[in-house]
Image (spheres, rainbow, N blue to C red):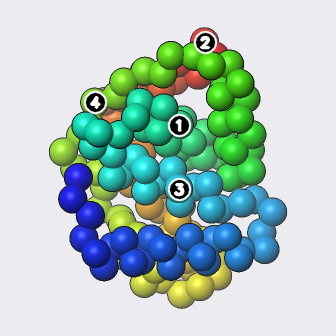
Amino acid sequence: MRIVPAEQDAYDELQCYTLAHTDPAFVHQHVVDAWAAQHADDQTKPIALAFALFGLYLHVEKGLSGRHVQRAHMALARKGKTWPVFALPPERGAVTALRVMAAAAGPERDAAIDAWCAAVWAAFHESHRQVEEFLEQA
């Protein structure tokens, strides 16, 4: 998926924002997962898309914080499994890093991050069951 330079700039700025965020929930993880899933292409390693979708599922569907998602990623990585391959939908959600950065810093931007995660997760609706089944068996 082609990345528009302005969107890359917004993502870079958003990473700075989330890494400096004082909330122990670690919202940075959600930003990394949303970006990775939204911009995956046929060159993306299966583990990268799998972990992004696992993170989105755990956040959007299960309400886990970024810190909890990060711990789940670490636990899964230790198991050293073969990672599933997911279909890439042509549309990946209308919310982008640009829209997130347009929101005011603080609660409004944090809510925009959640909306971004939900939009990207919804775009991968055909993979939801595959994600759930993999995590149930992990």
User: Residue 118, image x and y in percent?
Assistant: 45, 52
The earlier-in-sequence mark between 4 and 2 is: 4
- Crowding at dot 1, Cα within 10 Å, few <14 / some 14-19 / many 20+, comes out as many
Rendered view: 102 above or below 87: below
Q: Is residue 12 left or right of residue 62?
A: left
Determine the CA span between mark 3 and mark 1. Answer: 10 Å
Determine the CA span between mark 1 and mark 4. Answer: 14 Å
Determine the CA span between mark 4 and mark 2. Answer: 20 Å
Tag 1–tag 2 contact (CB < 8 Å): no
Instruction: Name the residue beneath numbered marker 2.
Output: 137
Tag 3–tag 2 contact (CB < 8 Å): no
Examine the rendering and report whether any part of residue 35 can be seen: yes
Taking the view exactly as shown, the residue that stands out farthest to the top is 137
SS category of the residue bearing label 2: helix
Task: Identify which residue, 54 or 19, lies in the foreground.
Answer: 19
Instruction: Name the residue beneath numbered marker 1.
Output: 51
User: Residue 87 got which mark?
Assistant: 4
Instruction: Name the residue beneath numbered marker 3.
Output: 32
Tag 1: residue type? Phe
How many marks are shown on the rendered structure? Answer: 4
The earlier-in-sequence mark between 3 and 2 is: 3
Examine the rendering and report whether any part of residue 123 can be seen: no
